[in-house]
């Protein structure tokens, strides 16, 4: 299966793919819900890692770990919003349901537009818990970051709210942008 020519941010939904959600707060104000289709049809291992961190199914020392309570720690307008470091909160934490890091599954899907869900990494085969959502086409990231899902419907409006939060040093938001609740639909 080739990713060429497909507008991944607009492709028809696959009813077999899981749908997950984030309820986001900015400061103390609810900003809305981001619903995402996970591309389990093309990146099943990456999608399952993310899904379990959304549901809290994955446990460490008997306790659920995942994205609930996690914050978007890096925001770059017209590029992306990054989150998922529930270990350290600053972009240096890495954990996956498969161990510390796991390999790049494939690069079938491309960064064709806004609202794509992609793995943040520190080089080849260093996927863990961190991810980003694109705010625009980011084709320079193709073949470097695994795209494994996309935002659905009005979730793009919530993404835009987060994208427009003022930032300080290291592109850190000046207001906390928190995944207050998350799960699977």
Image: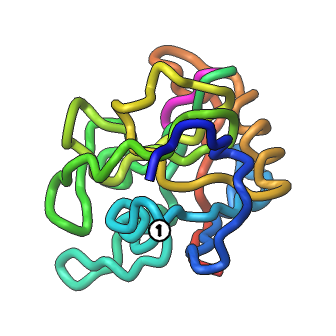
In what element is the residue under mark 1?
Answer: loop
Residue 1 visible here: yes
Instruction: Where is residue 138? Give x, y as percent.
Output: 56, 24
Residue 90 visible here: no
170 to the left or right of 23:
left
Task: Reply yes or no: does residue 76 show up in magenta.
Answer: yes
Q: Nearer the viewer, residue 52 or 32?
A: 52
Chief SS of the magenta region: strand
Residue at the image position 59 percent from the left and 80 percent from the top = 16
The residue tagged 1 is: 40
Image height of 88 relative to 69, above or below = above
Colour mapping: rainbow
* Span shown in magenta: 73-77
Image height of 82 relative to 63, above or below = above
Q: Nearer the viewer, residue 56 or 107?
A: 107
Residue at the image position 30 percent from the left and 46 percent from the top = 88
Furthest-top residue in view? Answer: 169
Q: Nearer the viewer, residue 106 or 124?
A: 106
Residue at the image position 25 percent from the left and 68 percent from the top = 97
The residue carrying pointer 1 sits among few (fewer than 14), some (14 to 19) or many (20 or more) residues within 10 Å by Cα, namely some
Quarter holding residue 36: bottom right
Instruction: Where is residue 31? Give x, y as percent.
Output: 79, 52
For the C terminus, the image quarter is bottom right
Q: Nearer the viewer, residue 148 or 108?
A: 108
Instruction: Where is residue 2? Give x, y as percent.
Output: 46, 46
87 to the left or right of 160:
left
Instruction: Where is residue 126? Give x, y as percent.
Output: 21, 42
């Amino acid at each position: 299966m080739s990713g060429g020519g497909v507008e991944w941010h607009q492709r028809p939904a696959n009813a077999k793919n899981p749908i997950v959600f984030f309820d986001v707060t900015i400061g103390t104000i609810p900003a809305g819900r981001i619903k995402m289709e996970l591309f389990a049809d093309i990146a099943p291992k990456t999608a399952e890692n993310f899904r379990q961190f959304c549901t809290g199914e994955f446990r460490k020392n008997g306790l659920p770990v995942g994205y609930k309570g996690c914050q978007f720690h890096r925001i770059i307008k017209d590029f992306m919003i990054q989150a998922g470091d529930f270990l350290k909160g600053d972009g240096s934490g890495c954990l996956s349901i498969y161990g510390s890091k796991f390999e790049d599954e494939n690069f079938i899907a491309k960064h064709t537009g806004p609202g794509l869900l992609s793995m943040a990494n520190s080089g080849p085969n260093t996927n863990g818990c961190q991810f980003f959502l694109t705010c625009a086409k980011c084709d320079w990231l193709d073949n470097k970051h695994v795209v494994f899902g996309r935002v659905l419907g009005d979730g793009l409006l919530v993404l835009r709210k987060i994208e427009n939060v003022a930032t300080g040093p290291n592109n850190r938001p000046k207001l906390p942008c928190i995944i207050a609740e998350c799960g699977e639909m």
